[in-house]
Image: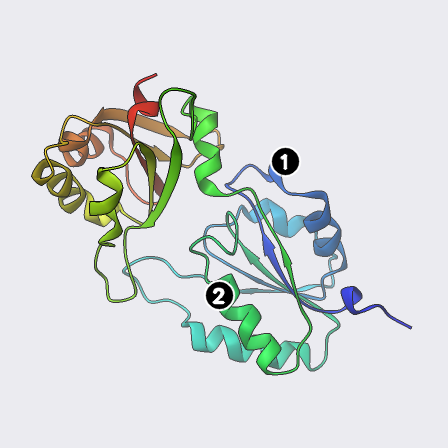
Amino acid sequence: MKKIEDFGLFIVGGGPGDPDLLTIKAFKVLQRAEVILYDNLINKKLLEIANPLCKIVYVGKKPYEKCTSQEEIHELIKHYIQNHSVVVRLKGGDPFIFGRGFEELLFAEANGIPAHYIPGISTMQATGFSGIPLTHRGVSESIWAITGTKKDGSLSKDLTCAIHSRATVVIYMGMKKLAEIAQTYITAGAGNTPAAIIQHATLPQQKKVTCEVKDIESAAQSAGLHYPAIIVIGNVCAI
């Protein structure tokens, strides 16, 4: 008799980019996968782990372009689980950190589908590969992870609160909001706060720029940085 952990939907974090950073548990599940529904940001080399008979389906979402809706992804999960024992939902970074993975887990459970979460190394942890720690004794007392683009397209107002803390501020999905981020800091009198943008973290083509947050938009343009990238703001960027 199969254990519940042996079948169902597996919501898997693919990590920040480097395939060697995949967890062992995720590796084993990918080997057993009968269907993989994968995101735009995962390293395609991870798909090579799967059995050649595995059905691989792209359900990516490129920002500001046509994408697979969340509703369509839910329907695909329900469709494939009817005839397959192991369906993997493969996401970049960690699925529960701005990855909408928990929405898919709730959908699965609401439809009687066994669902399992396998975490991945989050994108913000990958800042260490470019020499920026998330915390450092005497410099940063906490971490504040913020979405740069809420469901309605706006920048999270939590940023205004985070500015007044000693936290390292990490902004996901914020490359289209650089001017607004800079202005928020300037308005708060914190425009000189050190900042960094890291693109393609952990990969050979990784690029980084550091600056004061008031100059973050022009610094990104000068360095040719664009999505996918993560923004880090705080004194850890100047260590």
In percent of width and height, residue 122 lies at 50, 43
Q: Mark 1 highlights which residue?
A: 20
Secondary structure beneath dot 2 equals loop
Above-or-below relation of 56 to 130: below
Examine the image and state in which quarter residue 164 appears.
top left
The first of marks 2 and 1 along the sequence is 1
Q: Report the Cα–Cα distance between label 2 and label 1.
A: 23 Å
Dot 2 crowding, Cα within 10 Å, few <14, some 14–19, many 20+: many
Near mark 1 (Cα within 10 A), the count class, few <14, some 14-19 or many ≥20, is few
Residue 170 drawn above or below residue 91: above
Q: Residue at x 76, y 69 (%)?
A: 7
**Residue position marked by numbered label 2 in the rendering:** 59
* Visual colour scheme: rainbow
Q: Is residue 8 left or right of residue 184?
A: right
* Residue 130 image point, x, y percent: 42, 24
Judge whether 234 appears above or below 62 on screen.
Answer: above
* Residue that appears at 42% across and 70% down: 68
Q: Are marks 2 and 1 in contact (CB under 8 Å)?
A: no
Q: Position of residue 26 (x, y in %)?
A: 68, 50
The front one of 42 and 56 is: 42
Please tell me which residue lies in front, 157 or 164. Answer: 164
Q: Amino acid at mark 2?
A: Val
Q: Residue at x 72, y 66 (%)?
A: 34
